[in-house]
């Protein structure tokens, strides 16, 4: 996201807790000199972000809160950074779809146990147990921090379990377009492996 946002012309501050991941990110940024001047990367923790309140027009946290014990404190720490008129974008595991990947890939014992228990956590694609949130819970957290939720999207609805899929470029584009069409529509979006919520801090006059 740092690379994409900087390539779109934005000034981007990236924070990462792991020195190894930070170094990997720094190498990728350095490989694109035309964007490097717009990017600042720093080591830090989501619970102690070293920025003033309302410092950013957009705060983006993708693929992180699923590794943390809960989303309450992380969303509060992220939301305080959002400027008036700015947005918060959080992508994380979708609790509504826990068990779907397991069922589609034939691991019925895990799928059934997860579906019957309605549990929040399951093993993610890195082999680590990750925790899901529902879009409603995330929208409530945004409201609790003074933000107004925008429509949420489901992500990786039809292709999450297809780990050995090798599409042609044409098939890949068609798959992306299909995922995009479904991402904002129920009942498809509820089945996304991931949920993307956005919320805005209303501009004050
Ligand atoms: C799956 S990666 C996602 C990275 C990036 N956001 C992306 O979408 O490519 C999750 C990252 O969260 C980082 N992380 C985990 N706990 C964190 C914390 N408390 N504060 C900041 N970063 C954290 C990990 O080190 C890891 O690099």
Image (spheres, rainbow, N blue to C red):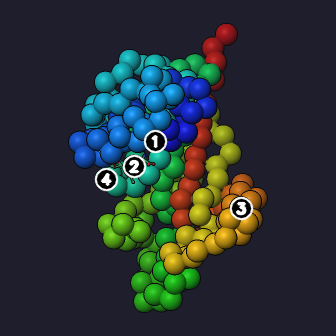
Q: Is residue 185 left or right of residue 131?
A: right
The span from disc 3 to disc 2 (Cα, nearest Å) is 27 Å
Tell me if I can see residue 75 in this picture.
no
The span from disc 1 to disc 4 (Cα, nearest Å) is 16 Å
Name the residue that disc number 1 marks.
Answer: 61
User: Which residue is at the front of the view, 160 or 80?
Assistant: 160
Disc on the earlier residue, 1 or 4: 1
Q: Mark 1 against mark 3, which lies toward the viewer?
A: 3
Disc on the earlier residue, 1 or 3: 1
Count residues near mark 1 (Cα–Cα under 10 Å), then give few for <14, some for 14-19, many for 20+: many
Image point 64% across, 72% down: which residue?
A: 167
Name the residue that disc number 2 marks.
Answer: 64
The span from disc 1 to disc 3 (Cα, nearest Å) is 25 Å
Tell me the SS state at disc 2: loop
Tell me if I can see residue 189 in this picture.
yes
Q: Is the C-beta of the residue carrying label 1 under 8 Å from the nearest atom of ligand 1?
A: yes
Q: Is residue 91 left or right of residue 204?
A: left
Pointers 4 and 3 in contact (C-beta within 8 Å) = no
Name the residue that disc number 4 marks.
Answer: 69
Q: Mark 3 against mark 2, which lies toward the viewer?
A: 3
Give the x, y percent position of residue 39.
43, 27
- Corner quadrant of residue 125: bottom left
Disc on the earlier residue, 2 or 4: 2
* Mark carried by residue 173: 3
Q: Quadrant of the C terminus?
A: top right
Tell me the SS state at disc 4: loop
The span from disc 2 to disc 1 (Cα, nearest Å) is 7 Å
Q: Mark 2 against mark 4, which lies toward the viewer?
A: 2
Q: Is the C-beta of the residue carrying label 2 under 8 Å from the nearest atom of ligand 1?
A: yes
């Amino acid at each position: 996201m740092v690379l994409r946002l900087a390539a779109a012309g934005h000034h981007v501050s990236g924070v990462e807790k792991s020195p190894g991941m930070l170094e990997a990110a720094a190498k990728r940024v350095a490989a694109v000199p035309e964007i490097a001047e717009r990017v600042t990367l720093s080591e830090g923790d989501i619970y102690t972000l070293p920025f003033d309140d309302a410092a950013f027009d957009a705060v983006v946290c993708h693929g992180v809160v699923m590794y943390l014990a809960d989303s309450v404190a992380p969303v509060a720490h992220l939301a305080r950074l959002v400027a008036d008129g700015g947005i918060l974008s959080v992508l994380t595991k979708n609790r509504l779809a826990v068990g779907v990947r397991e069922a589609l890939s034939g691991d019925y014992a895990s799928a059934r146990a997860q579906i019957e228990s309605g549990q929040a956590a399951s093993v993610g694609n890195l082999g680590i147990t990750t925790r899901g949130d529902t879009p409603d819970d995330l929208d409530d957290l945004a409201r609790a921090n003074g933000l107004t939720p925008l429509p949420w999207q489901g992500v990786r609805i039809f292709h999450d379990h297809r780990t050995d899929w090798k599409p042609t470029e044409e098939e890949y584009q068609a798959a992306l377009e299909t995922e995009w069409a479904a991402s904002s529509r129920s009942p498809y979006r509820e089945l996304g492996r991931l949920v993307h919520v956005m919320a805005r801090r209303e501009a004050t006059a």
